[in-house]
Image: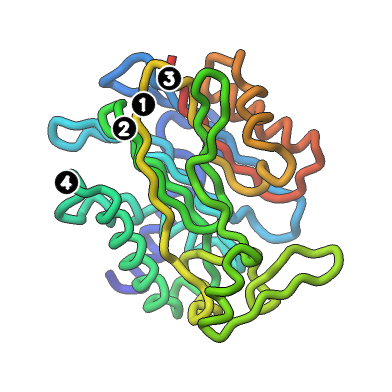
Amino acid sequence: MAGKDILLKMKEKACFAVGEPMTPDSGKGKSRMSKNITHGFHLVKGKSNHAMEDCQVSEFKKVGENELGLFAIFDGHMGHDVAKYLRSNLFDNILKEHDFWVDPKSAIRRAYKATDAYILEQSPELGTGGSTAVTVILINGQKLIVANVGDSRAVISKKGMAKQLSVDHEPSKEKREIEKKGGFVTKFPGDVPRVDGQLAVARAFGDKSLKRHLSSEPDVAEVIIDGDTESVILASDGLWKVMSNQEAVDSIKNIKEAKQAAKHLTDESLSRKSRDDISCIVVKFQ
């Protein structure tokens, strides 16, 4: 795809809503295969001077005889074009992998790698910024495949107990790997650890100027949905900076409607003085 076609495609697709939009930053939907599975999302721009850099995907898609729930949060930095590209293309790239239905974890790893390579190749059009990602694929309402790079996070609730499904890729945790690649990790007073004094995550898509020291390898996990599963929460770090996994689960345990639950979590984050962009998706299993 030519660079100008990439930008045209991104402009044709809004960065916010997929499914049944209620407002430009909020929406909901439900599974056709199981009436007990619903989803909702809510996004809020932070107090920074730059434009909103978060994007999301939240939809159910029929693929042959199967139904896939596709959910993702993309948190861009140094511009939002990479996040927009991911929103429009990453799931398509995953599903194009020939063995997705046989070995979805390997297919996702390859798709992440190929997508990152393409983003770097198209940096003249997409810019040199980057994006974190957390993606969740719900297969026929029975199994979750979770992948992530960066610090956007997925959390599942079973019997009221929160369990983190993704991995926060913090520079301090991957300092040895970064230094092996010739990079370094800084930690100045009052700030968070950063790769080469710049980026506060150790893995991301894009970021051409840092890529020699930065990984785009996702952590991938598989989780079975059973009768104890109540909800899955995906959110950008604007939420997780001010709320623990268990606090998030407890906060929505009595809210049945998924879109209302997602909005409640963003509102609670704002009340706790989060200043970052906040994106949240809630999938409810009732």
Q: Name the residue at the front extreme.
A: 176
Identify which residue, 149 or 119, lies in the foreground. Answer: 149
Q: Residues within 10 Å of mark 4 (few under 14, many from 20)?
A: few
Along the polypeptide, which appears first: circle 2 or circle 4? 4
Marks 4/3: CA–CA distance: 25 Å
Q: Are marks 2 and 4 in contact (CB under 8 Å)?
A: no
Q: Which residue is mark 1?
A: 225
What residue do we see at 24% from left, 31% from top? 67
Where residue 40 appears, x then y in whole percent? Answer: 50, 28
Kindly report which numbered mark, 3 or 1, lies closer to the viewer in this rendering: 1
**Are the residues tagged 3 and 1 within 8 Å (C-beta)?**
yes
Q: Which mark is residue 285?
A: 3
Which comes before the other along the chain, label 4 or label 3?
4
Q: Earlier in the sequence, mark 1 or mark 2?
A: 2
Q: Secondary structure at mark 4?
A: loop
Q: CA distance from mark 3 to mark 2?
A: 12 Å
Decide if residue 76 is on the left or right side of residue 125: right
Q: Amino acid at mark 3?
A: Phe
Q: List the residue tagged with mark 2.
A: 143
Circles 1 and 2, Cβ within 8 Å, touching? The answer is yes
- Residue 143 image position (x, y, % from top left): 31, 32
The residue carrying pointer 2 sits among few (fewer than 14), some (14 to 19) or many (20 or more) residues within 10 Å by Cα, namely: some
Secondary structure beneath label 1: loop
